[in-house]
Image (cartoon, helix red, strand yellow):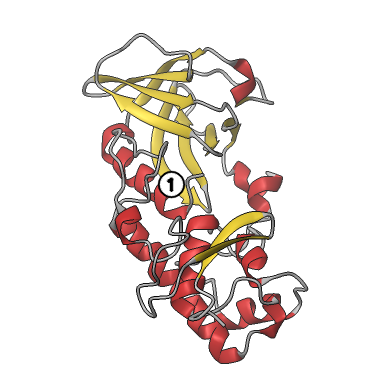
Amino acid sequence: MPELPEVETIRRSLVPLIKGYEIIKTDIFHPDVLINAGKRPLRGWLITDLRRRGKYLLIDLINTNKKHSGALLMIHFRMTGKLLHRTEEIVPTKHTHIRFHLQGPTKSWLDFEDVRRFGRIWLLAAFGERENPGLAGLGPEPLSEDWTYQSFREKIQRRKTSIKATLLDQTVVAGIGNIYGDEALFLAGINPQRKASSLSPEETIKLQDAVRFVLTDGIGHRGTSFRDYVDGLGGKGYFQQFLKVYQREGQKCAICGNQIVKKKVAGRGTHFCPHCQK
């Protein structure tokens, strides 16, 4: 599943290509993928900005006929979703669920593809993230100043779950998934099985710093590509070349030389070094 660095990379790759373009037509090949509760028309929308909130990509729209009327496309990629920009119209595949026809200085197309068909697109009223339960309940952005030590400390002290489960809880902090959760815990030297409430103030600071570091590093390497993830141009990320524990079960720890192990924690396959992470 694309996590914060992957969604941010998708956003950055698409901004110069579609911002300022108009959606002149939308092809819906699989209606269940698009949730349009307001039955708003799917044409005549000018793309004014692309934002990210946690693992969601947000596309701000203004109606070209009614300048005061806005809308929001909210996209969640789930496991295998992709948003691909094309300069030539190709025959849609069986995995092409939605196609947006765009008009700007040139004509282009934006395809939402998803092999497993879990991804979803919502068409909401402008600033609909304030009312959408999935977005309204998100915790702070980990790369923003809103994610303070005090707020993080208070949340983990109240938790009875493992620190791994706590990091994956999007109401605690938004955008962290299995890959970056494992990597941050390794960098901080914290065993993912520990109760969140057992962390000392010093460990809390180390973990917060580690989360920020691995997310920033992930963005710098354009995300992690194992199978499905690509950016808006179809390019793969390469942070997988620098992972310390994730998907490295049985390999030597880069610090101590002991084997990386994999255990199920919080219902997720979790990779860590039992020697380095206490």
Classify mark 1: residues with Cα within 10 Å, few (<14), some (14-19) or many (20+).
many
Q: Extreme left residue here?
A: 105
Give whichever of 5, 59 is nearer the camera: 5
What amino acid is at disc 1? Val
Question: Residue 151 placed where, x, y %?
Answer: 63, 78
Q: Is residue 86 above or below residue 80?
A: above
Image side of residue 230 versus residue 122, left or right: left
Question: Residue 22 placed where, x, y %?
Answer: 37, 24
Q: Tell me if I can see residue 145 in this picture.
A: no
Q: How many marks?
A: 1
Image side of residue 200 versus residue 240, left or right: right
Give whichever of 105, 205 is nearer the camera: 205
Image quadrant in which you'd find residue 267:
bottom right
> Quadrant location of the C terminus?
bottom right
Q: Secondary structure at mark 1?
A: helix
**Residue shown at 46% from the left, 21% from the top:** 65
Image side of residue 170 versus residue 59, left or right: right
**Residue shown at 33% from the left, 64% from the top:** 217
Q: Extreme top residue here?
A: 91
Q: Is residue 178 above or below residue 225?
A: below
Residue pointed to by mark 1: 7
